[in-house]
Image (cartoon, rainbow, N blue to C red):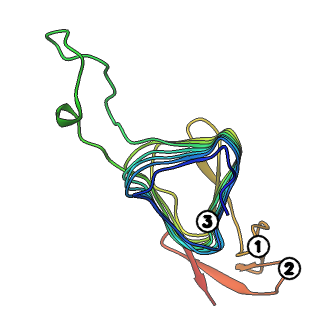
Amino acid sequence: MNAPDSDVDPRARVAGSARVWGLAQIREDAVVGENCIVGRGAYVDAGVVIGDNCKIQNNALIYAPAVLEPGVFVGPAAVLTNDTYPRAITPEETLKGPSEWDMVGVTVRRGASVGAGAIVLGGIEVGEWALVAAGSVVTEDVLPHALVAGVPARRVAWVGERGVPLVLRDEMWVDPDTGAEFLERDERIVPA
């Protein structure tokens, strides 16, 4: 269902079960999967791929060639960028065109979340079930299950699949909601 005041390019592929709210823009060749929600004023650039069951909140900006795997959450006013060295003009002071820069997309893996107002720089990968805290600026890859926060974002905790921080008990990381146990190996966590 698309709101009447949304702007969905006819060349975009939006699943029939997806909901696109008012003033959202989905550009040509973008893909929006089943059961997705694209919030009011969100921008989905040309060629962006959004998997099933994703939530893109109000005023989030997702620039090509971003890829969001199934179950990703992008918070209000979050930005996934695509230009490592942005400039409006060339050294000759002419307006840069598309052929004069290399787009590098953000990849957000299954079940991960990017909090409100966070900025993820182009070329970054956010790992499965990771959580980027609100207002963070992500300048390097985020490990699976990592909770990162700050400017620049740094790992401050590990989180379970529900986003709740894991608790360290006898050298074992434990999900307080599910009881699932993880071991820390080589700066990553793995199921015990």
Query: Which residue lies at the image location 32% right of the left edge and 47% below the top edge?
Result: 104
Q: How far apart are the alpha carbons under marks 1 and 2?
A: 8 Å
Mark 1 belongs to which amino acid?
A: Arg
Judged by depth in the image, the label closer to the viewer, 1 or 3, is 3
Q: Nearer the viewer, residue 99 or 127?
A: 99
Q: Are marks 1 and 2 in contact (CB under 8 Å)?
A: yes
Q: Nearer the viewer, residue 182 or 36?
A: 36
Q: How far apart are the alpha carbons under marks 1 and 3?
A: 12 Å
Residue under label 3: 72
Query: Which residue lies at the image location 81% right of the left edge and 87% below the top edge?
Result: 179
Of the numbered discs 1 and 2, the one sitting upstream in the chain is 1
> Which corner quadrant holds the N terminus?
bottom right
Residue under label 2: 177
Q: How far apart are the alpha carbons under marks 3 and 2?
A: 20 Å
Instruction: Please rate how many residues cluster around mark 2, counting C-alpha atoms within 10 Å: few if below 14, some from 14 to 19, many from 20.
Output: few
Q: Which mark is residue 162?
A: 1
